[in-house]
Image (cartoon, rainbow, N blue to C red):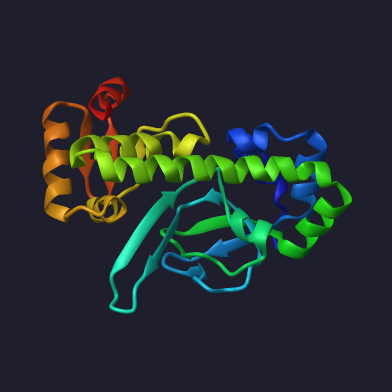
Amino acid sequence: MHDPHPFLARLQQGHWFAGLPAELQGALLGMAQVLQLEPGQRLFRRGDKPSGLYAVVEGAMRIGAVSESGKEALLTLVEPPYWFGEISLFDGLPRTHDAFAESASSLLLLPQAELLALLEAQPRYWRDFALLMSQKLRLAFIALEEMSLLPAAPRLARRLLLIAENYGEGAPRRVLHLAQEQLALMLAVSRQTTNQILKELEAQGIVRLSYGEIEVLDLERLRRVAG
């Protein structure tokens, strides 16, 4: 296990961790274990027992599920500083989805037993973890609404904005390490439709497309397309 403290500055770039009391930040770093994953390596599978809370500090993680027929549902592709795994912290039930390393990645693991012991000793901190989960729940409700009400183009623009803003966790970034196939899976639209919309955005000078990446050139105009 490596020392998690060099990742402190990276974690503090995220709104949730930066907003925690200093003593809680210290307690979490004190129990954190560093995990290194190779590209494509599975962290956990749907149905696995809960192991704790994770933070992506280097690389990227793919969260989704694969059906028995092999069809993939991709929910999120997340980069630092992003926390996940909090649902199983609250209910103690098995993992809801699969998590794989999209690229070589470093994670911090807060082990379930140690985290629960801390929260039993300091129950006031439960609210901080509830805020992490409620932020995810809010985004999930918005995504469900958009799926029902919005055409593909504004829905795609909104998802690009969400990823660029790291799901509300940090300052916007311009280069999204995201293949068009992955974006199509997230939106449950065809690869052809996704490509057509992205080509239109590129023709307008809003994005630039390259292999495995989408660069946002004009964030404000992307927001206008998103409505």
Quarter-wise, where is residue 223 in the image? top left
Closer-to-camera residue (140/192)? 140
Total numbered circles:
0
Residue at x 79% of width, y 34% of height: 22
Q: Is residue 223 left or right of residue 121?
A: left
* Rendered location of residue 96, percent (x, y): 51, 65
Q: Residue furthest right?
A: 121
Quarter-wise, where is residue 209 in the image? top left
* Rendered location of residue 221, percent (x, y): 25, 22
Q: Is residue 163 left or right of residue 1?
A: left
Residue at x 45% of width, y 41% of height: 139
User: Up-down: is 37 above or below 70?
Assistant: above
Q: Does the image show residue 12? A: yes
* Rendered location of residue 117, percent (x, y): 83, 58
* Rendered location of residue 102, percent (x, y): 41, 59
Quadrant including the C terminus: top left
User: Up-down: is 13 above or below 88?
Assistant: above
Residue at x 20% of width, y 42% of height: 152
Quadrant including the N terminus: bottom right
Closer-to-camera residue (184/177)? 184
